[in-house]
Image (spheres, grey):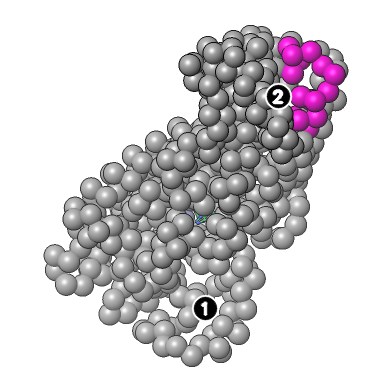
Amino acid sequence: MTKDSFKLTNTLSRSLEELRPLHAPEVLVYTCGPTVYNFPHIGNIRTFIFEDVLVKSLRRFGYAPKRVMNITDVGHLTDDADEGEDKMEVGARREGVTAWDIAKKYEEAFLDDLAAFQLETPEIMVRATDTIQEQIQFIQELESRGFTYRTSDGVYFDSSKVPDYGKLARLDVAGLQEGIRVAVGEKRNKTDFALWKFSGEAGKRHMEWQSPWGVGFPGWHIECSAIIRSTLGDEIDIHCGGADHIFVHHPNEMAQSESVTGKPLARMWLHSEFLLIDGGKMSKSLGNVYTRADLEERGIDPLAFRLFTYSANYRARLNFTWEGVNSAAAQLRRLRQHYQAVAEGEWTEVLNSYQERLNAALADDMNMSVVLAVVWEVLNADLTPREKRAFLEDAGTILSLDLGKQENQGIPEEVSRLLEEREKARADQDWDRSDALRNQMADLGYHVKDTASGQEVLKI
Ligand code: AMP
Ligand code: ZN
């Protein structure tokens, strides 16, 4: 595997491209972070897992990724556009605390999730509220170049000044403009967006700052442009986020940054598709905005969810079901059993060709379902347990599934073997065999219980 053969789908060109970093081996990566107004949901987590696999793959292929993530703790409004309320202030009202308390609480929750899903902490994490001055300066630069205008409620970016505005989303800007039926308020163009918003009524907001234009707070997009510039520079290699960012947030970041620097903001734009729940959108009214706590309540190891996300390419929508994540939990247990079957791995030559295939799948737009298929092929092959463990140790650096975690601790080998057999019987829906195996384990002094996350054994 050579460095130049890592291919990724660039949303900008809509095609598979070889990664060509500006200053290899360094790869400058920016990933839009969480809005810390509530617990991250498993859709957010899917996007963070994709970004984590990306960074780990880069390292595997000999690159030195430098990754920055922002924490959005101000300015993200409820409708993603410029109407609606700041999500932080909504959170504050919901919980009867200040927006600052909300930011602190949910930033901590996000950090806990990083650990629980084995997501590497980005090298540099920056809060939007810690970079207000940088954001103000950025807006001033845009202002001095003639890209801004004022309305009664803020300072806006004039998207008509950017001839290729919307190129990422392939927006038909002219069509959009003609098709406007609803009022755009004082905005000159439908695609214009807020850079700075005025607080309005004094004392209404918890988070507000002085600025050359009046007391207020930054628009949602400017934090990323300012943070990228101050941490990574004018031009970066890879910019990531969820697919919803293709249409508003990323075109706006791009317009702001490129209008100031005159350079392309990022060479590659990668987007992970949405996680759907039971075939539909996550929504509060349906009560299906699931978080890590919901997984754990049902006895699902968060890493089983991580494994579940590998069943589809990051660019494909993925449908979450409890059945699907339960079967991922059973798979995870089997992977762990293989890994723990021996204390040490032994790499032998026969593994090289499997490793090459795993790398090729990873280099092909991070095709994780093929990566997994190669892993299972190794585990089902006529190889020694030590060879299998060695392969899992290597694949584990990408999979990040904590394979050494002991689930059914201290169980005799005979019972472990029966458990595995029973898992197979259950998968084959051979209930008679499954009951017979349960009785055998009872004879050995172990009671087996079927839970949402699979079999659990208790000493009788
Ligand atoms: P937010 O906390 O809303 O700023 O979102 C954090 C990240 O999660 C962003 O990259 C979003 O694009 C992404 N995201 C939001 N909803 C989903 C979803 N249902 N599936 C996958 N990614 C999502
Ligand atoms: Zn961003």
Rendered image: mark on residue 245: none
Front in this rendered view, residue 47 or 401: 401
| Corner quadrant of residue 387 | top right
The residue that mark 1 highlights is: 160
* Vertical placement of residue 369 versus 347, above or below: below
Is residue 281 among the parts visible in the rendering?
A: yes
Q: Residues within 10 Å of mark 2 (few under 14, many from 20)?
A: some
Q: Position of residue 172 (x, y in %)?
A: 62, 78
The residue that mark 2 highlights is: 421
Is residue 362 among the parts visible in the rendering?
A: no
Q: Position of residue 433 (x, y in %)?
A: 71, 29
- Of the residues shown, which amino acid type is indicated by label 2? Glu
Q: SS class of the residue under badge 2? A: helix
Q: Position of residue 106 (x, y in %)?
A: 33, 46
Q: Residue furthest left?
A: 203
Q: Position of residue 326 (x, y in %)?
A: 59, 41
- Of the residues shown, which amino acid type is indicated by label 1? Ser
Residue found at x 60% / y 47%: 323
Mark positioned earlier in the residue sequence (1 or 2): 1
| Corner quadrant of residue 167 | bottom right
Q: CA distance from mark 1 to mark 2?
A: 66 Å
Q: Residues within 10 Å of mark 1 (few under 14, many from 20)?
A: some
* Vertical placement of residue 146 versus 363, above or below: below
**Along the horizontal axis of the image, is 443 left or right of 380?**
left
Mark 1 near mark 2, Cβ–Cβ under 8 Å? no
Stretch of the chain drawn in magenta: 374-388
**Along the horizontal axis of the image, is 121 left or right of 367?**
left
**Along the horizontal axis of the image, is 412 left or right of 200?**
right
